[in-house]
């Protein structure tokens, strides 16, 4: 190269543009992810060259070598640890040949990824061993003639610091880009915030602090703001300039479709974010998993439209999620959908009585495919022993692209258990909780079981919203990272004691409840009258209400509900329709449910469907009826 990477980075009015994914492109060409992709530098060099060529033609200024996993630990899994140096050298030589044939001035970045093993104290690999492995790979890259090093997709701050140290020993004055990846919670896998990670990299003296992989451009933008703030509030080590910044997002969160991994973000979206990253002050941008030459070309076109540079974005104060401060974890999908005004369909499922979850998983799959927004998991309904709802929520969220709502009774839990259970739920990725008193044990399988509780529902809502979501426990002690629970409360729109129910509702609203789930409603006019009474006394109820819909299964079922469940009153007309339907009564119940939903849709934020007798097929018909 006729100019150094850092000098071009400093003088360019727009960011330099790196390439996109290598693994995704190889997978699209029939290479399985179980193969050693780095070894293709030796076995199928033309395939790697083809990917490089596509990115150069798309307008990339920087090409990353196909050496992300070319360290002794990852190569050992394929019996190739003795070929580490050869694979790394071949990766650089391939990139150089393609660049030379293109007649373009493009930088070659030696790509170094994590070792694929945990460092002590979370694993058995010592820091000195990790540094030696990084030094071995980096030495081969440097000797082959890279222009810079990019240490990318690290989720352990201590590991990337060892890689940085190895680069300092093996590469001396070669520029180093150090890039971290984060989970959906804007934290590393070991729980470090972007703020903390950036401060550590700044103190280590890296030239470029970056964020890559993670989610899509929106999350990367949010994290980059925090990293920039961290650097702005600190001083670089003596002899080092303030760092530059890089941003290389995935093409959104991956989804498995027909056995293939698919990414939703399109090239045009990336083009828009190229300018956003530029405005935020990123000097190096590009793509990660799921991005293609088309994504890079869209970013190139967007940058070329601003040849004099992007307008400077004023750095806004961002929440860095330190103890006691507001959480930087993004809101749940349910929270986002309600904020956007989408009509929500939630369906309740009961955990199994035993160990088998096969029927439950099959039912959840049906509901997800039908278009449910969220699945509610009850906790010991009717005080009967069932599997823990946390496990069920975790299983469903792991298997399907759908969120759950964890029912969280206060009954039977003291303060210690309440708080421990909340931490456990959050650690399992559960963000939506529905706070309820719970059924008394006297009506269930174990009538003599303990029935005490330390908190009423409004008190638990307050604990979650005002303490846990601010990083504190009930006693005011720090819990490290704030939670970001989206909290629901119960509401009976057809209660006999209207004034008493309004008082309970007011306590929940003041505690900060985010949404409300109601008892089943068969009298829409009574529900509307309740809301009118509330508005008359306290103004409009702004908390979203998901109105309860319990499909009638037949005449006997309706008779039971009408006579034995407080607050439920079923009209004579409904009884007549069910009786006339005969064996078709379950379908008539679906039709009645859809009619009720239509009558309440003007004021409800969504519906909370409670299918009886595990008839999830009928719930799916209701979902499709609502969507259609």
Image (cartoon, rainbow, N blue to C red):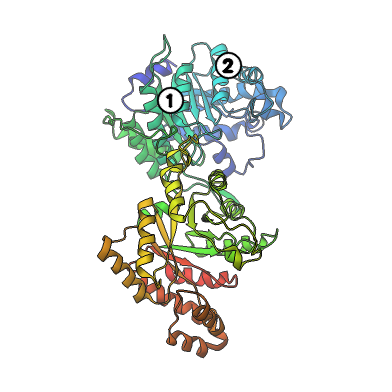
Q: Nearer the viewer, residue 521 or 417?
A: 417
Mark closer to the chain start, 2 or 1:
1
Q: Are marks 2 and 1 in contact (CB under 8 Å)?
A: no
Residue 396 pos. (x, y %): 58, 55
Give the vertical position of 178 relative to 502 (above or below): above
Badge 2 is on which residue?
Answer: 166
Pointer 1: residues within 10 angstroms few (<14), some, or many (20+)?
some
Few, some or many C-alpha atoms within 10 Å of disc 2 (few <14, some 14-19, many ≥20)? many
Per the model, the C-alpha gap separating discs 2 and 1 is 31 Å
> Residue tagged by mark 1?
104
Instruction: Find numbered disc 1 in the image and state the secondary structure of the residue it sits on.
Output: loop
Relative to 4, residue 357 above or below: below
Q: Quadrant of residue 117?
A: top right
Picture disc at residue 139: none
Residue 578: give x, y in percent of width and height. Answer: 50, 86
Q: Find the residue positioned furthest to the top.
A: 239
Please state the horizontal and vertical placement of residue 407, each as a whole percent of the image: 52, 57
Name above or below for residue 328 compared with residue 529. Answer: above
Q: Is residue 102 visible?
A: no
| Residue 346 image point, x, y percent | 47, 62
| Quadrant where the C terminus is found in the figure | bottom left
> Which quadrant: the N terminus?
top left
Numbered circles on residues, count:
2
Residue under the image location 48 percent in, 74 percent down: 566
Q: Secondary structure at mark 2?
A: helix
Frontmost of labels 2 and 1 is 2
Q: Is residue 156 left or right of residue 600?
A: right
């Amino acid at each position: 190269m006729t100019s150094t990477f850092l000098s071009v980075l400093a003088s360019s009015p727009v960011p330099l543009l790196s390439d996109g994914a290598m693994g995704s492109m190889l997978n699209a060409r029939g290479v399985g992810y179980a193969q050693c992709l780095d070894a293709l530098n030796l076995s199928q060099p033309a395939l790697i060259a083809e990917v490089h060529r596509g990115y150069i033609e798309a307008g990339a200024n920087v090409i990353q070598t196909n050496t992300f996993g070319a360290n002794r630990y990852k190569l050992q899994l394929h019996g190739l640890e003795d070929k580490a140096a050869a694979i790394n050298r071949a990766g650089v030589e391939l990139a150089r040949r393609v660049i030379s044939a293109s007649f373009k001035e493009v930088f070659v970045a030696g790509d170094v990824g994590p070792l694929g093993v945990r460092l002590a104290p979370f694993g058995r690999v010592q820091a000195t061993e990790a540094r030696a492995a990084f030094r071995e790979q980096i030495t081969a890259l440097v000797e082959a003639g890279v222009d810079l090093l990019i240490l990318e997709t690290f989720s352990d701050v201590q590991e990337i610091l060892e890689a940085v140290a190895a680069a300092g020993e093996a590469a001396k004055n070669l520029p180093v880009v150090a890039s971290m990846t984060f989970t959906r919670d804007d934290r590393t896998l070991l729980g470090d915030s972007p703020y903390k990670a950036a401060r550590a990299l700044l103190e280590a003296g890296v030239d470029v602090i970056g964020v890559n992989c993670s989610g899509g451009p929106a999350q990367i933008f949010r994290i980059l703001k925090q990293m920039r703030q961290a650097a702005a509030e600190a001083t670089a080590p003596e002899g080092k300039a303030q760092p530059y910044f890089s941003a290389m997002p995935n093409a959104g969160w991956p989804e498995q479709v027909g056995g293939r991994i698919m990414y939703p973000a399109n090239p045009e979206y990336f083009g828009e974010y190229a300018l956003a990253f530029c405005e935020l002050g990123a000097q190096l941008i590009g793509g990660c998993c799921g991005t293609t030459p088309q994504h890079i070309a869209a970013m190139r076109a967007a940058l070329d439209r601003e040849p004099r540079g992007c307008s400077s974005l004023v750095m806004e104060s961002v929440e860095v999620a330190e103890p006691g401060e507001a959480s930087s974890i993004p809101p749940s999908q349910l929270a986002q959908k309600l904020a956007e005004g989408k009509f929500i369909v939630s369906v309740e499922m009961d955990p199994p009585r035993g160990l088998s979850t096969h029927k439950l998983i099959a039912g959840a799959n049906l509901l997800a495919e039908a278009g449910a927004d969220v699945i509610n998991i009850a906790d010991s309904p009717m005080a009967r022993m069932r599997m823990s709802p946390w496990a069920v929520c975790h299983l469903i969220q792991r298997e399907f692209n759908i969120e759950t709502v964890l029912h969280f009774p206060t009954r039977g839990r003291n303060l210690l258990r309440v708080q421990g259970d909340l931490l456990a739920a959050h650690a399992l990725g559960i963000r939506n909780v529905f706070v309820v008193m719970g059924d008394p044990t006297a009506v269930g399988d174990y009538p003599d079981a303990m029935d005490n509780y330390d908190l009423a529902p409004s008190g638990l809502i307050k604990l979650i919203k005002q303490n846990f979501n601010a990083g504190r426990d009930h006693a005011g002690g720090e819990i490290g990272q704030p939670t970001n629970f989206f909290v629901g409360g119960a509401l009976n729109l057809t209660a006999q004691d209207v004034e008493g129910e309004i008082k309970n509702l007011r306590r929940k609203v003041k505690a900060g409840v985010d949404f409300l789930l109601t008892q089943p409603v068969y009298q829409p006019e009574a529900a509307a009258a309740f809301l009118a009474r509330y508005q008359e006394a306290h103004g409009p109820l702004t908390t979203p209400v998901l109105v309860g819909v319990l499909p009638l299964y037949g005449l006997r079922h309706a008779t039971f509900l009408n006579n034995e469940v407080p607050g439920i009153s079923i009209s004579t007309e409904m009884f007549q329709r069910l009786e006339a339907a005969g064996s078709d009564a379950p379908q008539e119940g679906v039709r009645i449910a859809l009619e009720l939903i239509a009558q309440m849709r003007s004021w409800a934020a969504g519906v909370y469907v409670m299918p009886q007798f595990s008839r999830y097929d009928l719930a799916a018909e209701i979902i499709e009826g609502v969507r259609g």
